[in-house]
Amino acid sequence: MIAATQLARRHRFRWWELLPWVAGIAVFFAFPNYLSFATQVLITILFALSLDLVLGYAGIVTLGHAAFFGAGAYTVGMLAMHWGWHEPFSGLLAAALVAAVIGFASGMVLLRTHGLTLLMLTLCTMTLLEQAANMSAAWTGGFDGMPGLSFSKILGLFGFDALYFRSQYLYALATLFLCFVVVRMLVYSSFGQSLTGVRENLLRMHAIGAPVRTRQVLAYTVSAALAGVAGALFTQANGYVNLAVLGLERSAGVMIVLILGGYGRLYGAFVGATAYMVLEHTLAKAYPTAWQLGLGLTLIAVALFARNGVIGIADSLRRRLEGSAR
Amino acid sequence: MDPVSILLGGFASGMVLFIVSVGLSVTMGLMGFVNLAHGGFAMLGGYVIVLAMKHWGFLFLPSVALAFVTVALFAVVLERLLYARLYRATELDQVLFTIGLVFVMTAAVTLGVGPETQVVQLPDWLRGQTDLGFIKYRTYSLALIAAGVLLAIGIWLGFERTRFGARIRAAVDNRRMAQSLGVDVGRLFAVTFAIGSGIAAVGGGLGAEILGLDPNYPLRYLVYFLIVVSVGGLGRVTGVFFAALFIGVLDFVLKIYFPKGGTIFIYVLTLVLLLWRPRGLFGRRGA
Amino acid sequence: MLETRGLCKSFGALEVAREIDFRLERGARHALIGPNGAGKTTFVNLLTGVLLPSRGNVLLEGEDVTTLAQAKRVKRGIARTFQINQLFRGLTVQENLCIAVSERLGVGGAMLRPAGKRADVIDEASRLMEILKLGEDAGRRVVELPYGRQRLVELAIALGLNPRVLLLDEPAAGIPSAESHILLDAIATLPKDIAVLIIEHDMDLVFRFADRITVLVSGAIFAEGTPAEIAANREVRAVYLGSALDA
C-alpha cells in the first residue's frame, strides 16, 4: 500500500527543505550590500508564514492581519522608547505575548462570525488599532511614529548597524528558522490536520464532534504571536516604527504575497515573499504605475485561473507529469 | 457651528455615502459576492464627469448622465466576462480578484489622466448659498441632500413597486427559492450590477467635492463603503440609507470636535454593532 | 436508545416537525421513509443538534440531550451522514478518515506529534478503508473520486466515530446499484447493538435492510411498524408507496 504510507512519511524531513536555509546563508556572503533589503524579505516571509496558518490552513479569511504585525512592532518600539527595554530577544518575546493576547481576545469574539462580517470585523479591528496608535501620540509618536530607536547588542556581542545589516540579517534568519520549526510542527500535527478539516468543511467538522471554534482561536492566537514577532523584527532591524505597520496596505500586501506563493503549503510564504519583493524592488521603484497595473492583472489572473499560486502551478505540473508517466 | 449646519453638512456627506454604497449593498446581498472594487466604479464615474466637462464640452448634468451610462455599460461587460466566473468561488478568490481590479483601475487612471487630484467644476446654479428661510447653507450640499433623497425614494419605489424589484427582493431573501420559481438570478444580477455601478459612478462625481477624486479613491474609502453596507444590512436599501446618514453625520461631527483620530468611534461602533447583529441593523436575522 | 417526545419545529409559520414521538431501539435497523419535503432531514438535524426544537425533547439512553451541543452529542455516540456529501474535498481519503478518527480518540488538538506518527489513528483509518473497499483510493483526493466512491467515504467517516447511534441520510443516493451492496455489507459488519436509522427512497433497499419502518408525512408520523405491516398498510400505499410507484 504505497498510498497509505503517504501520510506516515509526509512530516519527514526532505533534503530540499535545506535549500531555503542554505540560500539564506549564501545571500549573507554573496550580497553583503543588499542585506538591508534581504532582511525585509525575511521579515515578510515570517509575516506571510503566520498568515498561512490562519488563511491557508484554518481557512480564516482576514483583512486585518497587520493588526498583529503592528502590535508587535509597537510593543518593542514603546518598550525601548519609554521603559529603556532595549534587549532584543526578550523584546521579541514581549511582542509575541502582546500580539497573542490581542489575537486571543479578538479571536474569541470575532471568530463566531464568518464571511463578509468576519472580513469587516478583522478590518475594523486593525483600523481601530491604527487610529488608536495615531491618537495616542504621547505613547506612539502618532503619525510620525518613533524614529531613531536603538537596541542593545544581540547576546551582548553583535550590534545592530543602521548601514550594514549584517547582524540584523542573521538575527532575522535565526528567528525565522525557529518560528518556521514551530509552524512546521503544528502543520504536520493532528492539530494542523484538523485545521485543514475546518478549512475544507465546517459542517462536517462539527458533525464529527470537533471543537471547531477552540481550534480556530488557537490557530489565530499562535498566528498572531508569530506576526507579532515579525513586526518586532521590523522595528528592531530598522530602528523605527510608524503607522505604516498597521495599515490595510500591509494586510492586503501580505495576503497577496502568500497567495502568489501558494497558501496552505508551508513554503508558499518563502517563494511568494522573495519573488514579490525582488520584483517590487526592481520594478516598483522605476515604474510604480506599471507595477501596480501588472500586479492587478496578475491577481485577477490568479483568482480566475491559478488558485494555488506559484507552488500550486508547480504541483499541478508535477501531478500531470506523474499522471502521464503512469 | 450651529447644530442645523452640522446636521446639514453630515446629511450631505451621508448622501454621498448612500449613493455610492447602495449598489454595493444590493449586489452583495444578491450574490454574496465580496466586491472590494465597488469604489472603483465610483471613481471612474468621477473621472468621466471631469473629462466630459473639461475636454468634450459637456455641461454638468449631461456629464453626470454620461457617467452613469458609460460606467453601467463598463460594469456589465466586466460582470459578464469576469465576475460571473467567480460567483461560486471562495471569498478569498473574490477578494483577490476585486483587489486586483482596484489596482488595475487605479493604475489605468494614473496612466491615462495623471496622479493628481481632480476638481469637478460645478455649474453656477450649484454654487454659493441658498436661503432656506431659517438658515443660509451651501447650495451644493442642499442639492446633494435633495438628490440623495430623490434617489432613495426612486430606488425604494423601484424595489417595492416593480416586478423587477420584487424579483430582487425575493432573490436576496432566498436565492435558491427564487431560482426554483423561475427567476433568472444571473441576468437579474447583471442588470442590478450595472445599475448599482452606474449609481455609484454618479455618487463618485457628485461627491467629489466632499470625498475628493484621485486614483487612490477606491482603496481610501473602501472601509467606509463596507461599513455602510454591513451596518445597513446586505441588500437593504432603507438600511443602507439610514446607515449612510448616521455615519455621515457622525463622521462630520467627529471631524469637527475630535479632528485627531475621532473617527475611531466609528470603528468601535461598527465592531460592537456587527458583533451584536452580524447581519447589520436592518438585515434579516437567522436564515 | 434514542427517543423523542412531542418534538416540534417550525420555521415561522411553516411546521416541519409536529409532535414526533419516536423510539430508536438498541440494535435496531430502522428506516424512515416519506415523500419529499416530509421533514426527514429536519428530523435528523433535530436529533443531532444542528437544529434546536421549538418544543419537545430528545433523549439519549433516557437522558435529556435536547439542548446539548452537536459536538457533545457526537461524543456521546450519535453519528450521521449527510444527504449531500460533506467531505474534506481537497484532502485524501486517508486524511478524511484520520481527521474523524483523531477526533474520536481525542487527539485532534494535539500539536506536538506529527499526525503521520499516530499509528493507532492510521491503522483505524486503514481498517475503515478496508471495510468500505476504499484501500486503492487512500492517497487520492476526495474531489478526484467519482460521486459513488465519495459516498462511501461519507459513511466511513461516520463509522470512524464509533457510534452507538448511526443516522444515515439517503446513504445510497448517487451510488451505482452495482456498488450499493458495499454499503449494505458495511452496515452488516457493525456490532449488533448499534442502532441504525436510515432515510432512504430506494424501497428495495429499505425492505432488505429494515426491521422497522416509520413513515413521515408533512412533519408528523403517519405510520409505524414492521416492513410487512407497512407494506400492507393501505393508507401508506396511497400516500407514499403508491406515488413512489407511479413516479
Image (spheres, coloured by chain):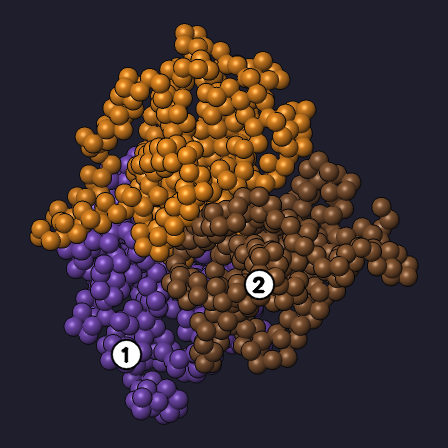
Chain colours: A orange, B brown, C purple
Q: Chain of mark 2?
A: B
Q: Nearer the viewer, residue A285 or C200?
A: A285
Residue at disc 2, secondary structure: helix
What residue sits 38% from the left and 69% below the top? C24
Q: Determine whether B169 is above or below A234 in the image.
A: below
A252 or C25, which lies in front?
A252
- Dots 1 and 2: beta carbons under 8 Å? no
Residue under mark 1: which chain is it in?
A: C
Residue C47 in percent (x, y) is at 44, 65
Same chain for the residues under marks 1 and 2 in the image: no
Q: Amino acid at mark 1?
A: Asp
Of helix, strand and loop, which one carries label 1?
loop
> Which residue is rendered at x = 54% and y = 56% of the image?
B44
Query: Badge 1 is on which residue?
Result: C202
Residue B67 badge:
2
Residue B268 is situated, as x and y percent measured from the top left of the image, at 65, 44
Q: Is residue A37 left or right of residue C209?
A: right
Q: Is residue B191 visible?
A: yes
Label 2 packing within 10 angstroms: few (<14), some (14-19), many (20+)? many
Q: Residue at x 61, y 40 (%)?
A: A128
Above or below, comparing residue C243 to residue B235 in the picture: below
Q: How many marks?
A: 2
Residue at screen point 13% across, 53% down: A323
Q: Which image quarter: residue B173? A: bottom right
When asked about the image quadrant of residue A259, the answer is top left
